[in-house]
Structure formats: C-alpha cells, structure tokens
Image (tube, rainbow, N blue to C red):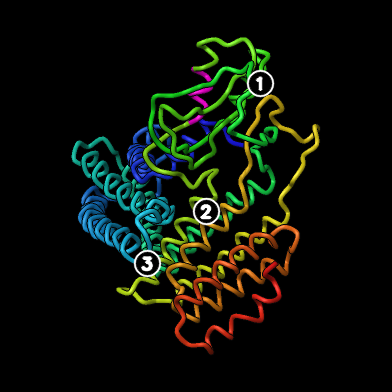
Amino acid sequence: MISKWQWLLSQLTRTLWVRAALFALLAVVTALIAIPAQSIINTPLPLNIGADAVGQILNILASSMLAVTTFSLSVMVAAYSAASNNATPRATKLVQQDTTTQNVLATFIGSFLFSLVGIIALSTDVYDDDGRLILFIVTIGVIILIVVTILRWIEHLSNLGRLGETTDRVEKAALETIRQRVEHPTLGGRRLENSDEIPEDATTIFCDIIGYVRHIDVGALQQCAKYHDAEIGVLVLPGEFVHPAKPKAWFKGKFSQEAKSAIIASITLGNERSFSQDPRFGLTVLVEIASRALSPAVNDPGTAIDILNRAIRILIHWKDHKTDESEDNLLYPNVWISELNLSDLFDDIFLPIGRDGASMIEVQLQLQKTLAALADNSPETFGEDVSRHLRLMQERAEHSLTLDADKQRLKPINARLIK
C-alpha cells in the first residue's frame, strides 16, 4: 500500500507540466555544458566548427520545434476532446496521463529551449573553438533524439484518443485496482464487518470537507493508532462521497485533537474520484462507455459487447479473493476497514448495460454469456450474483423483447443458472 505522499507524487509525475519542466531544465543544462567542458580540454580538438555553422542549425531547430510543439498541442487537445465525446469525460484523465504524449511534447519543448540557449550563448561569444565543437556534437545528438521522437509520435497518433485505445486504458486501470483488492481486500487492515456500527467506547471522527474519497493512507493510520495505543476504524472506502454529517472513522483509545488531525489527513478527499484504490470507478467508467454506445444517437451495440468481454477479464480475478487473512499477513493490525462487496461490482457493470440494452437481443445474449462464464469459472464466488442478475435480465426481456423467438433464445442458460 503506497503512502499519501507517494500517491501524490505519482499523481504529480503524471502531469504534463512536470515532465516539460524537467526536460526544459535538462535542455538548458545540456546547451551550457560546453562552457565548462571547453576549459577542461588541454589540447585543441582536431575539428574547427564555425559559429555560423552551428548557429544556422540551431536556428532551424528553434523555428521548427516551435511549430511542431504548437501542432502537437493541438493534436493532443483534439485527442482529449475525442476521448470525451466518443467514450466518456471520466476517461479523459487517463488519456491526459499518457506518458508517450507527455514525453514527446517535453522533448519538443526541451529541443526548442536547447536551440534558443545555444543561439544566445553563441551570440555572446562564450564558446571557443572547442566549445563550438562540443555544442555541435550535442546538437547532432539532439537531432537524432528528435527524429526518433517524431517517428514514435507518428505511430502513437494513429491510436491516441480512439475509442478502443481509451477503453484499453480504463480496463487496465480497473484491472490493476481489482488485483490490489484481491490481494489485500481491506487494504492491509483488519476486516470491519459492519461499517454502520460504531463501538460504544469509540470517538466518531467527522470532517467539514465535502467530496469523494480519493486515497486512504492506511500506513499513516497504523502509525497514528500505534502511537496512541488505540484502534482506528475507517467507515468510508475510496470512491465514496462524504459530507460533514457522514462519519469518516472511529477512534478507540485516548482521544486527542492530534489524533483527529492525523486521521483526517490520512484520508484524502477531492472533487473527483480517482482510479487509484477504487475499482468501482473503473467499472463505472467502462459502463458509461457502453451506455453511450447503446444510446439511440450512437446505436453501437458492438462496443457494449466489447465492454462485457472486458468485464469478464476484470471480475474473473475476484475468484482468488482472500476471504480471511492470518495475523502474520496483516500489514496494519490496528486499523479496521470494510472490504468491497462483490454485489456492488456486479451492479456497477451489469445493471446499466442490462437496462440500456434490454431491447437488443445481441446485447442480452452477450450479457447472459458473460454472467454464465463467471458462474462456470467459480460458482461459489459468482453464483449468487449471477442468478440475481439473470432474474433481472429475464424480467427486462419479458417487457422489452417483442419476439417470442428472441425470448426463447435466453431460456436455456437462465434455466441452468437461475436459483
């Protein structure tokens, strides 16, 4: 489990401006490195490069990189708009965190600044003959880097912002968090059976901030509990919406304002949900893509069928869900946290698709096959929820499907799995 500061750092490093600033700084240092390097060289280098030769190359780089950067920024904005319109606005965040796009733009900006600083340095005659040769060699290296980056960028543009590529990103994010929860169902703490029950001798912690739970630093809560020789129960889960009247946690021990501040600081809130620690958000974004595809304006049942196939790949991991952790495997024994409910995961992904695709036999058949595949892989894990959703699907089919032949096609699997 990563700490709050590690999580904040990971969020920060995924932003474009951080990478661009680092590449810009590296570019300035690279352009000026020839100044101290030329003083170290004791013997003249065999080649003599004129200031005009290097300056012309740097002028070409500066003008071209500025144009390429402007063009790339417009392409990036168009890709964000396409991801929002074709998929869902909630998926745009993942597209914005694309490292290839960020590295490409940072390389172009860095190359522009390298050229600009080099031109200024040449104009002020800070380079001697050896320094100009070093600058020339570094410039050739920058040109090679630009060529490789442009080739990668051309390849990457063929997929950036496309529906399939955006859906892949959402599936990957949901799959990662599901695997984390399978390995640590309660984020490393003890299992809290009922989050609505608060011990009589415990102090309830409230917070004035309104928003979604984005991250829970269970390690910091463990440190707080050990320091005060207490136990802490977390009453909210990542992705949950909280308000001042909703309790966030309880504290069982000698309570102090210091402990309250530490608990509140360990539970990060924000205006938007985060894919980190929140597998339900990933499933919700996937189902938004499917619902948009099933709308009369789009009428794309194939995308909804694709989402159902992805749902199998994500939920199948729940069969390895650890129902009981030994004392030796507990990472944070003084912290109590509720675990995710499988029924909620099923409702997040299957209820909207079943509702929006109720009148489409191809969607209903695929939904039935998806549920059957989960039940066949692990009846003891998925059987109850599969049966519940098949009953709902059967009721919708009776009201929405007009042909008896279509209704008959759904009956064999229903008869086998509905309990």
Please, what is the three-letter code of the amino acid marked with disc 1? Glu
The residues bearing labels 3 and 2 have C-alpha atoms spaced at a distance of 20 Å
Q: Quadrant of the C terminus?
A: bottom right
Q: Which mark is residue 213?
A: none
Q: Which residue is mark 1?
A: 231
Q: Position of residue 155 (x, y in %)?
A: 41, 69
Residue toward you, 241 or 327: 241
Question: With respect to residue 369, does 7 lie above or below?
Answer: above
Instruction: Estimate how packed mark 3 is, as few (under 14), some (14 to 19) or many (20 or more) residues with alpha carbons within 10 Å.
Output: many
Q: Earlier in the sequence, mark 1 or mark 3?
A: 1
Q: Which residue is mark 3?
A: 292
Nearest-to-viewer mark from 2 and 1: 1
Question: With respect to residue 277, does 225 lie above or below?
Answer: above
Nearest-to-viewer mark from 3 and 2: 3
Please, what is the three-letter code of the amino acid marked with disc 3? Arg
Q: Which residues are magenta?
A: 261-267
Q: Which residue is mark 2?
A: 173
Q: Secondary structure at mark 1?
A: strand
